[in-house]
Amino acid sequence: MRITGRRGVSPGISNSVRRPSLVMVSLVSAWHTFIFLHAIICFWGVQAEVEPPPSNWDYLIFTQEWPQSACIAYKGENSQRACEIFSNVTSWTVHGVWPTKAGTKGPHNCQKLPFDLEKLRQIEPSLLMRWPNIYAGKSVYSLWKHEWLKHGTCAAELPSIGDEHDYFALGLHWSATYQPLSVLETAGVRPGADRFQWAQIRDALTAHFSTKMIVDCELDRETKLWYLTQIKLCLDKSFVPTDCHNKSEPISTGCPAEGILYPPIIPTPVPVLKPEQAEKQESGTEQEQETVPGKTPAKEELVEIFTIELSKNEVVPRTSRWYSWYRMSGRPY
């Protein structure tokens, strides 16, 4: 007599039915484990890509330059060079924020982070005033691109400097906080025809800044005159001023004991738009440029200088006369 189980199924068949269900449970469990481990691996992989590498430098050199002296030095290297200093540039401007390893230069070009101009649109008017490119014939943005690729990609190794906006906004903030113009004026060192002693400049900076700085002077090879060009302040990774060196006072690179010139800023005249040109600019229509061989357009007949006051957070429309000057001068964006 054949013994059957529930619903007429033999015990042997019943066991065979239960056995696959145990296998399925094992497979599902293994699959969940795989998914969990894969998620962890992907998470750590993304983290490794997002987080910047550890910085291989000690402090930041915040370098400010006097535009007129920088222009003289620039043209002194090549007589064919020219500068364009606009009327809203009235003080020391930013040259760069340079990560530096003590005792060396650099590092440079630390990460492959392409320059994204769109991240600077909000602060662009302030950059044109405090971090301008004064070298004629070059893109308005070429200096910013150069500084970002060479120095900014290294500064971005700090979590507090995530992108171009953070890097250049930091330079603008320091430009307002550590502006040398009023510091030097207080000590009687003012732009003009006077010649100053190194001791006057040194003492003025020492009286105001508690850290040891670096001051650069440049020699005009044609006139053999010395010009005050750059002032460098160092800050640690927490953005606290620190000594640039271990000397007892600010040091200079090339500054003579006396006879240092601090020339007044002479802005490049801005051409006046004719009424019909102004209307086209206000409507956003591109101005066609008339060129004369060997001459810079719209620079021969100048009547007045447009003074553009830019507040810290002001955004200037691209149809304004400020931008039209770049188009008329043939200077690329």
Image (tube, rainbow, N blue to C red):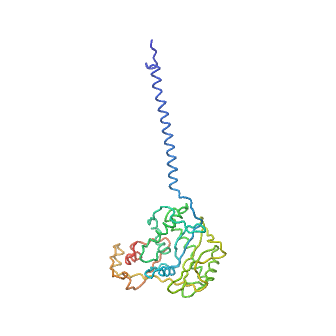
Q: Is residue 297 above or below residue 8?
A: below
Q: In front: 246, or 196?
A: 246
Height in image: 242 above or below 226?
Answer: above
Q: In which quarter of the image is residue 268?
A: bottom left
Q: Quick one: which residue is furthest to the right in this view? A: 248
**Which quarter of the rendered picture does the C terminus lie within?**
bottom left
Judged from this view, the residue extending furthest toward the bottom is 193
Q: Outermost residue toward the top?
A: 1
Q: How many labels does the image show?
A: 0
Quick one: 327 or 292, which is closer to the camera? 292
192 versus 131 height, above or below = below
Quadrant of res 293: bottom left
User: Which is nearer the eye, 207 or 247?
Assistant: 247
- Residue 216 lies, in percent from the top left, at 57, 78
Where does residue 69 sit, x and y in percent of width and height?
Answer: 51, 81
Could you tell me which quadrant the N terminus lies in?
A: top left
**Residue 217 x/y as whole percent:** 56, 80
Residue 252 location (% of width, % of height): 60, 78
